Image (cartoon, helix red, strand yellow):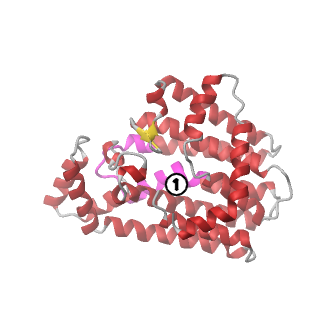
Amino acid sequence: MSDLKKQILSAVEDDLQAIEQELVTNLTPHLALVRKVASHILFSGGKRLRPLLMVLAARICNYQGNYDKTFSTIFEYLHAATLLHDDLIDGARLRRGRLVAHSVWDNPTAVLVGDFLLARGLAIAAETGLPQVIKVIAHITEEMSQGEIHQLQRKKAFDLTEAEYMEIIRRKTAVLFQGACRISALLAEATPVMEAALADFGLHLGMAFQMADDLLDYTTDSAVLGKQVGADLKEGKLTLPVIHALANAENGVREEMIAVIGDPGFSTTQFEKLVQQLASLGGIDYTWRLAHQHIQKAKDALHLFPATETRQIMLDIADYALSRKL
């Protein structure tokens, strides 16, 4: 474990324990099977980054209520729901080192438990009594669904542009980070300027987080990653390292790369050569540079707030988004 990760975990230990308890307490399904399937994805080693960001963002806005941990569960339930649905759509085999839910149970059960978690998130949002919060959560679910559909439409599309990729990850990932931070400002009745700053922080952190996550597919082995290396390519997803490399490859090399990318049965040797090509064509470095730019924008957004311990933790989380190994 990196020193930065240890430092963050030490600072937020009590918050994470409280969030974990609220995730159990607020699940409240009527059927044991729903709890079993939901628990399979919820309690399989997730980082709790999204609910933690909501709690920290509320604190930086001087939130005085007692329900920040309860409301933070909205974002983990929404995230877990998308994972259940995404794994099914993608035909994934592993998630966090475990068999995916639809393999353990079946497709209809995984879909319906995902639907339950989405509804549970909306129900908890309604408990805030703030129409604006409900509106934000509803907008997030719309955006995430459309991001997934956009990605599904453009699977194995070798002409996928960088602009399309950015729009997909904004909708699939960044809006949830953005919403977690923005809702904290609404709960704390913070100023519109503070709300906008936290929304910017969450948006740029989410963009960088997804780029870093996409890079792990080419820089980490399966045992550490918790899923098959090359899974994105096997699922037909073109991420930024590939998009940039294809755009800069000469015809012969480009055709060779496309042949591998288009074959879900590619060998380990073929994948390793492809990774070398992504590196030599600048795809990996380019993705890191853009992720760093988004992290800097996220950190800049926090300059509005006083230099407190909470702000420092949020800055550390931004740095960790790039340095993490999984």
Q: Nearer the viewer, residue 93 or 205?
A: 93
Residue 176 horizontal/vertical position (percent): 60, 51
Secondary structure, mark 1, is helix
Residue extending furthest toward the left: 252
Report whether residue 137 is seen: yes
Residue shown at 47% from the left, 25% from the top: 107
- Which quadrant of the figure has residue 114? top right
Where in the figure is residue 184, as x and y percent of width and height?
74, 56
- Circle 1 sits on which residue? 170
Is 157 part of what is drawn in magenta? Answer: yes
| Residue extending furthest toward the right | 64
Residue 286 or residue 56, whichever sits in front: 56
Is residue 224 covered in magenta? no
Query: Where is residue 6, by image quadrant?
Result: bottom right
Q: Where residue 142 sits: x, y (%)?
A: 59, 42
Check the image and report above or below for 91 versus 300: above
Q: Is residue 62 left or right of residue 181?
A: right
Q: Which residues are magenta?
A: 150-176
How far across and how far down the image is residue 214, in percent?
Answer: 41, 56
Who is closer to the viewer here, 237 or 25? 25
Residue at 78% across, 55% down: 186
Q: Is residue 157 left or right of residue 114?
A: left
